[in-house]
Amino acid sequence: MRIHVPKDWEIAESAATPEREYRARTRRDFLKMAGIGIAGAFLLRPAARAALAGFPSRANPDYPGTDLKVTPYNLITSYNNFYEFGMDKGDPVGEANQGWKTDPWAIEIRGLARNPGKWDVDDLVKKFGGTEERVYRHRCVEAWSMVVPWDGFPLAKLVDFADPKPEAKYIQFTSFLDPKSAPGQRDESFGWPYVEGLRLDEARNELAFVATGIYGKPIPNQNGAPLRLVTPWKYGFKGIKSIVRVELTSREPFNTWQRLARNEYGFYANVNPSVDHPRWSQASERVIGGGFFSGRQPTLMFNGYEKQVAALYKGLDLARNY
Ligand SMILES: Nc1nc2c(c(=O)[nH]1)N[C@H]1C(S)=C(S)[C@@H](COP(=O)(O)O)O[C@H]1N2
Ligand SMILES: [Mo]
């Protein structure tokens, strides 16, 4: 007999929402939020991406977050940081949907990998056995937060597929580069493309996730189509969008925000209420869509995922390694 020992972030069977119910609820909420009825729902069909492998996502009775209040779809997809498509939160929803093509999409694996090459994203998702749902907290370094129901696959699957050589200690991610489609990339001072990275043991942590969807639908362009990183215990800027390349390295990657302001943004970017940003406190956060009375809440160590990730940072000075 196989005994299932629940992970800490898992939920009791009795508390789990059955897949069909969740999906129905999600759909109802989505339709309500979109302000349309059942008839109008039909018009939503021709979404940006007609079909991405893996949908509908597998039911995952283990995904965390049933105690969390999920942020409405229209807020998750209209309040964005995606500087390639503008500096204001409302820019990407418009600018990233003016003909920028995210299908088909290839991702390259290179560096200290035994399995380098270039793969179509849909083929990869199929190889990895489809997608699953995860409800995670999402905390930006700017001190706002959401709760997002992502669809995707564990990053560990991509790492295993790349098959790191023993010298590989880090994984570096690179976003797309296409100034014709992305107006923000015409400002070269930013140093495009956007780059991020993780230690390999962080990348293999059970929480590290590659999202290909939100709310059971393919991820919209403004949220990082067709695939983006999600590391819920870290500030949002680690969650690099629209990835075209992963590279296994022996050296710590130098990420975009480190390069732009090294004294403000580091490599680790772990959510930490007791390590303030040089220009503002990180002790609390503004809940997007939280309303007047529940609009602010205390920030949790590692964004509430301390039990899953604290062991990764044993002996590391978190104030110095911000
Ligand atoms: N390529 C790219 N990835 C990016 C960013 C960006 O500007 N470009 N912004 C980051 C920041 S600061 C945050 S908070 C999240 C925002 O993700 P969301 O718009 O899906 O909430 O994406 C991250 N990934
Ligand atoms: Mo952010």
Image: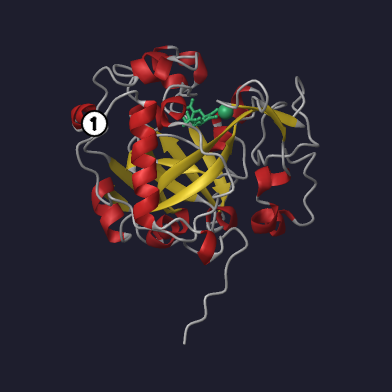
Q: Residue at x 54, y 45 (%)?
A: 136
Q: Residues within 10 Å of mark 1 (few under 14, many from 20)?
A: some
Above or below, 285 relative to 214: above
Viewer-closest of 81 and 41: 41
**Position of residue 17 in the picture relative to residue 219 (left or right):** right
Name the residue at the bottom extreme: 1
Among the 4 quarters of the image, the one containing residue 280: top right
**Position of residue 288 in the picture relative to residue 116 (left or right):** right
User: Horizontal and vertical percent for residue 86?
Assistant: 44, 14
Viewer-closest of 203 and 1: 1
Q: How is the image coloured?
A: secondary structure
Q: Is mark 1 within 8 Å of ligand 1?
A: no
Image quarter for ligand 2 equals top right
Residue located beneath label 1 in the image: 41
User: Horizontal and vertical percent for residue 59?
Assistant: 37, 58
User: Horizontal and vertical percent for residue 125?
Assistant: 30, 53
Viewer-closest of 183 and 81: 81
Q: Secondary structure at mark 1?
A: helix
Above or below, 82 relative to 250: above
Q: Residue at x 71, y 32 (%)?
A: 297
Above or below, 39 relative to 131: above
Above or below, 240 relative to 14: above
Is residue 161 shown to the viewer in this render?
yes
Is residue 242 shown to the viewer in this render?
no
Amino acid of disc 1: Ala
**Position of residue 115 in the picture relative to residue 99 (left or right):** right
Q: Residue at x 34, y 21 (%)?
A: 96
**Position of residue 195 in the picture relative to residue 103 (left or right):** right
Among the 4 quarters of the image, the one containing residue 100: top left
Quadrant location of the C terminus? top right
User: Horizontal and vertical percent for residue 210?
Assistant: 43, 47
Q: Residue at x 28, y 52 (%)?
A: 54
